[in-house]
Amino acid sequence: MNQLVRNSGAQSKENTMKAKSLREIIIWLIDHLTVTEQKGIENIPPSGGLIVATNHMSRMDIPVLFTLPKRVKVTALVTTKYLKYPLLRWFIITAEGIWLDRDIADFAAIRQAVQKLDQGFAVGISPEGTRSSTGQLLEGKPGTALIALRAQVPVLPVALIGTETSVVELRHFRKPHISVEYGKVIQPPKLDREHREEQLNQLTTEIMCQIAAMMPEKYHGFYKDHPRLKEILAGK
């Protein structure tokens, strides 16, 4: 039994070292192959479980997410559809990503995410649940809010701009211009099982509108006329 525990611990340490080395390589590549501007870094909590909620427009979003400043332990929930891309699959496995099957209620992935948050990880999630083909925000789904309520950790809204054209630009040997803006963290309320659906809807809306408020109007999509977005913009 002791030998099994030692072997498990050694394997876990090895995986963590691989993930750390990969992250260092990704940071170097993003720094040298793109022109990436990061704003609002002061809003990133330096420690503790943290949900990093981003809009999703490109496969480039995942590597950009792993450059999160001020944090060492970073992972993400990633859809199983990326399993068919060998390089991206290797990257996600090495980075200790959490596979999420979006075709079912994947409670196993949710449990893994909560475990990582309990261990002090920053866990990246796209509340939209899928990549936007237009670049405009899609309606947020309640999964991100559910994890935040269960884990009782803050949500960091993040707006990505420029990733939607980055892959094409890289293929043409041009440096894409990418903007990453970190908003103020959103603290989830205590889970009230009698009003859970209302809490999920309110928190999802707040996350998505905070993301939208950091983006130009052409990206607002589903939330372009939402009263909460108008309220946030009026207060800026």
Image (spheres, rainbow, N blue to C red):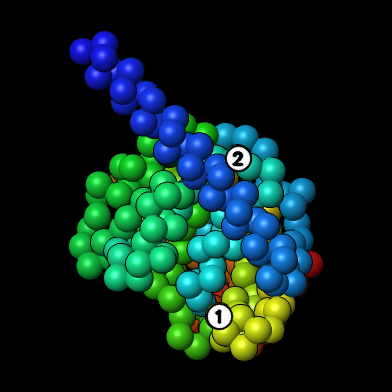
Label placed on residue 167: 1
The correct choice, above or below, for 151 with respect to 37 in the image is: above
Farthest top residue in view: 2
Q: Quadrant of the N terminus?
A: top left
Say if residue 179 shows up in the picture.
no
Disc 1 residue crowd, few under 14, some 14–19, many 20+, Cα 10 Å: some
Determine whether, in the image, residue 94 is placed left or right of residue 44: left
Label placed on residue 72: 2
Helix, strand or loop at mark 1:
helix
Pick whichever, 180 or 165, lies toward us. 165
- Residue at 60% x, 54% y: name it: 25
x then y, percent, for residue 80: 29, 64
* Quadrant of res 113: top left
Identified by mark 1, the residue type is Val
Identified by mark 2, the residue type is Val
Determine whether, in the image, residue 66 is placed left or right of residue 9: right
Please say if the residues under marks 1 and 2 sit with CB atoms less than 8 Å apart.
no
Disc 2 residue crowd, few under 14, some 14–19, many 20+, Cα 10 Å: some
In front of the other: label 1 or label 2?
Answer: 1
